[in-house]
Amino acid sequence: DEDDGTDAAVVVDTKPKTKRPPLYKVLLLNDDYTPMEFVVAVLERFFGMSHSQAFEIMLTVHKKGVAVVGVFSHEIAETKVAQVMDFARRHQHPLQCTMEKE
Ligand code: TYC
């Protein structure tokens, strides 16, 4: 019944974990119909980009098919996607904006 010290040690300590919220990439997708200037206006209006930044990202999407336009918390990313999709729909452009976990 005495502890003779023959049992294997078991690690029980855990890392002190600080919970960081997951981040989400907001993606803009290319299409054949949305005017380039409309996409530039979207990036300026909803993502706070300068005109030249916005033009650069728009061209990246146009050439590569998709680009990350920002990284946000889940709630902010959802809001950005909804704002872009609503703005595009109201202007009858097929522009698509989505989000994915980083
Ligand atoms: N490909 C479009 C055109 O030639 C421009 C465009 C760029 C559309 C980016 C969507 O996310 C987009 N008019």
Image (tube, grey):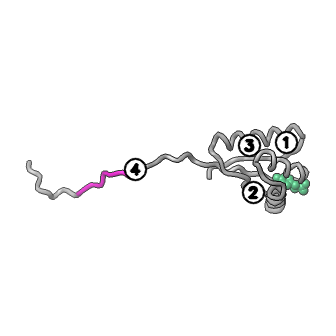
Q: Residues within 10 Å of mark 1 (few under 14, many from 20)?
A: some
Q: Amino acid at mark 1?
A: Ala
Task: Note whether ligand 1 is within 8 Å of mark 2.
Answer: yes
The region drawn magenta spans 9-16
Residue depth check, mark 2 versus mark 4: number of the one nearer the observer: 4
Q: Amino acid at mark 2?
A: Ala
CA–CA distance between discs 2 and 4? Answer: 36 Å
Q: Sequence order check: which comes first, mark 1 or mark 3?
A: 3
The residue at 14%/57% (across/down) is 5
Considering the numbered disc 4 on the image, is that residue within a helix, a strand or a loop?
Answer: loop
Label drawn at residue 88: 1
Residue nearest the viewer, comparing 10 with 58: 58
- Residue 24 drawn at (x, y percent): 64, 48
Q: Residue 54 versus residue 102: which sits nearer the camera?
A: 54
> Residue placed at 90% from the left, 52% from the top?
37
Residue 78, position in %: x, y? 69, 41
- 3 or 4: tag closer to the N-terminus: 4
Q: Are marks 2 and 3 in contact (CB under 8 Å)?
A: no
Q: Could you tell me if the residues under marks 1 and 3 are in contact, i.e. CB atoms within 8 Å?
A: no
Q: Which mark is residue 16?
A: 4
Q: Image quadrant of ligand 1? A: bottom right
Q: Residue furthest front?
A: 50
Residue identifier under label 3: 81
Judge whether residue 10 is colored magenta.
yes
In this orientation, which residue lies closer to the viewer: 99 or 7? 99
Q: Is residue 66 left or right of residue 34?
A: left
Q: CA distance from mark 1 to mark 3?
A: 11 Å
